[in-house]
Amino acid sequence: MAQYHLTTPLAGDAIRQLRAGDEVLLTGTIYMARDAAHKRMIELLERGETLPVDLRGQIIFYAGPCPPKPGQIIGPVAPTTAYRMDPYAPAMYEYGVKGTIGKGPRRDMVKEACMRYNAVSFAAIGGLSAVLSQKVRGVEVVAYDDLGPEAIRRLQVEAFPMLVAYDAYGGDLYEQEIAKYRQLP
Amino acid sequence: MRTVHVDEIRDTVARLCWEACYYLPADVVQGFKKAEQEEKSPLGKTIISQLIENAELAAGEHMPYCHDTGLAVVYAEVGQDVHITGGAFLESIHAGVRKGYDEGFLRKSVVGDPLLRVNTGDNTPAVVHTEIVPGDLVKLTLLPKGGGSENMSAMKFLLPGEGEEGVKQFVLDTMIAAGGKACPPVIIGVGIGGSFDKVTAIAKEAVLREVGQHHHEPHIAKLEADLLELVNKTGIGPQGLGGTSTALWVAVETYACHITALPVAVNIQCHAARKKSAVI
């Protein structure tokens, strides 16, 4: 399993080199969006309308931070459970999103979408919120401010640690690793 | 009769909200350290080390350990010789949650109507369990419950004849279905017995028990040990990325039940296993 230092935006070639289990330290721009923001965006895509933020070629981080304390850029933040976004993910990848960051296993519809649209699903460590907030260098709300912690935020991150969970070739890190340690009949 | 003013209840609840979210309990950190030693997967071991680092950083910087600072579940044990003055008891708890989540810079994760889904903006209402107990003290316990693991919890009525084996299978099935979605290494609270409502309540109370502390009944303590071993054989591991530390601890609580029934509930607690109590 390889280690990569990657910078956004990720080109098609960068996606093609990644395999399930690779470690990635990501630097650049990512967009934070979770349940309620996805619901709104999918409704726009279904009506053929423009999204409030152009996410084509971008990476979506499924997360909602704590409010920052005075002097903090952002409060604690880490990925939320990715499977809740599964019903929305294929349409987002089809629209042009190249990567998503979440935690936990996802359904086959996401694996298939990653293969079809040359995209990946990353895993970051759920609940590693104090540590991960230190990788954020800048943040601004760019849409759906009324959703509070669920608003869409643009983040600047530096060496943000993640793993490739599902690659563009059908690789599945969860399935692969759990099988190694299963001791049940 | 001792009097306790609602402002004291409000302020205590407020303090417990942020203290629970900033400072992961020592028994949980100890559980991580044991799991770090025992974990067979190199990736799993690395993840647990990072969780320990995260707990130390959060405590040192006085910031939440996890961004999901939860739905505030409050347990209030009120002595029957206490007279509460200055306002409504229940409202003082909600006021404490409102104050604590605001002052502590905690995430507000509650929507008012579950279908309309508009954030209430102050993390209220809390879920409050009140019990009248002997004495003249008020004990308040805060359990900020994260959504990822709560979503994976489950309840089922088994047939009485299914017995202990049935309970084991249900806990195992629930954990396999939860996998990495529940943020392992988890703590598992199991309720057995009671009624439809009681069994889920005792499953959640089990989550409050200290990691490493078994049930006082030997046969239940044995069941806890068996369940822990079984769950850690699933291979799910830290974050569901493979390994031998899927659960840090399993606590079982029981209650009497109807002759027809064997209710069982599994309340999954993510690794952000926060809890904090105070006595007024």
Image: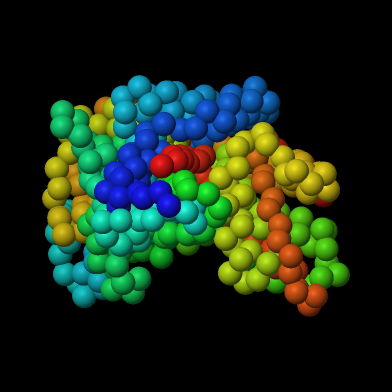
Tell me where residue B88 sits by quadrant.
bottom left
Q: How many badges with numbers are in the image?
A: 0
Q: Is residue B176 left or right of residue B9?
A: right
Query: Which residue appears at 33% of the width and 39% of the height?
Result: B15
Tell me where residue A113 sits by quadrant.
bottom left
Query: Which residue appears at 83% of the width and 63% of the height?
Result: B163
Q: Which residue is nearer to you in this view: B50 or A110?
A: B50
Residue A177 at x, y percent in the picture:
62, 39
Q: Is residue B16 left or right of residue A174?
A: left
Query: Which residue appears at 82% of the width and 58% of the height?
Result: B164
Q: Is residue B273 above or below residue B176?
A: above
Can I make out residue A17 in this image?
no
Q: Which residue is nearer to you in this view: B4 or B229?
A: B4
Q: Residue furthest front?
A: B1
Residue A107 at x, y percent in the picture:
51, 59
Can I make out residue B238 in this image?
yes
Residue A8 at x, y percent in the picture:
25, 36
Q: Is residue B115 above or below residue B199?
A: below
Q: Is residue B50 left or right of residue B113?
A: right
Colour scheme used in the picture?
rainbow
Q: Residue furthest right?
A: B161
Q: Which residue is nearer to you in this view: A43 or B34?
A: B34
Location of the C terminus of chain B (image quadrant):
top left
Residue B27 at x, y percent in the picture:
57, 31
Query: Which residue appears at 53% of the width and 49% of the height?
Result: B135
